[in-house]
């Protein structure tokens, strides 16, 4: 079992009725890349979160709780 850490950035725009609309997630190669991408997107998005998750891609077994790298703005309750 080879564990790998994956890095993601998820940005949100304002949706109808004050809801949040998720953009397509962005996969990054490093923690630094995820942080920089999130910081750049935070200038134009309602909310942005960058996080990592470790696990085995062959089995699909990933940690239950991601590690938050960066968060800013309005985010859905799932990211509290």
Image (cartoon, rainbow, N blue to C red):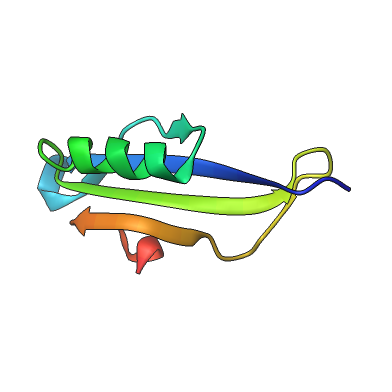
Where residue 37 sits: x, y (%)?
30, 35
Left or right of 44, for residue 69:
right
For the C terminus, the quadrant is: bottom left
Which residue appears at 49% of the width and 61% of the height? 67
Residue 30 seen in this snapshot: yes
Left or right of 8, for residue 40:
left
Residue 75 seen in this snapshot: no
Left or right of 54, for residue 35:
left
Which residue appears at 47% of the width and 33% of the height? 28
Which residue appears at 83% of the width and 45% of the height? 2
1, 59: nearer the viewer: 1
Where residue 66 sits: x, y (%)?
53, 60
Q: Measured along the vertical axis of the image, is residue 8 above or below residue 28?
A: below
User: How many dots with numbers?
Assistant: 0
Q: Quadrant of residue 71?
A: bottom left
Q: Residue furthest front?
A: 32
Where residue 61 sits: x, y (%)?
76, 52
Left or right of 18, for residue 5:
right
Q: Measured along the vertical axis of the image, is residue 22 above or below residue 71?
A: above
18, 47: nearer the viewer: 47
Q: Measured along the vertical axis of the image, is residue 25 above or below residue 69?
A: above
Which residue appears at 33% of the width and 65% of the height? 77
Where residue 32 sits: x, y (%)?
39, 43
């Amino acid at each position: 079992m080879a564990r790998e850490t994956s890095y993601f950035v998820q940005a949100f725009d304002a949706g109808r009725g004050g809801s949040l609309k998720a953009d397509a997630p962005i996969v990054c190669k490093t923690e630094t890349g995820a942080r920089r991408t999130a910081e750049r997107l935070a200038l134009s998005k309602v909310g942005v979160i960058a996080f990592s998750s470790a696990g085995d891609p062959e089995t699909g077994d990933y940690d239950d709780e991601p590690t938050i790298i960066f968060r800013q703005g309005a985010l859905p309750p799932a990211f509290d």
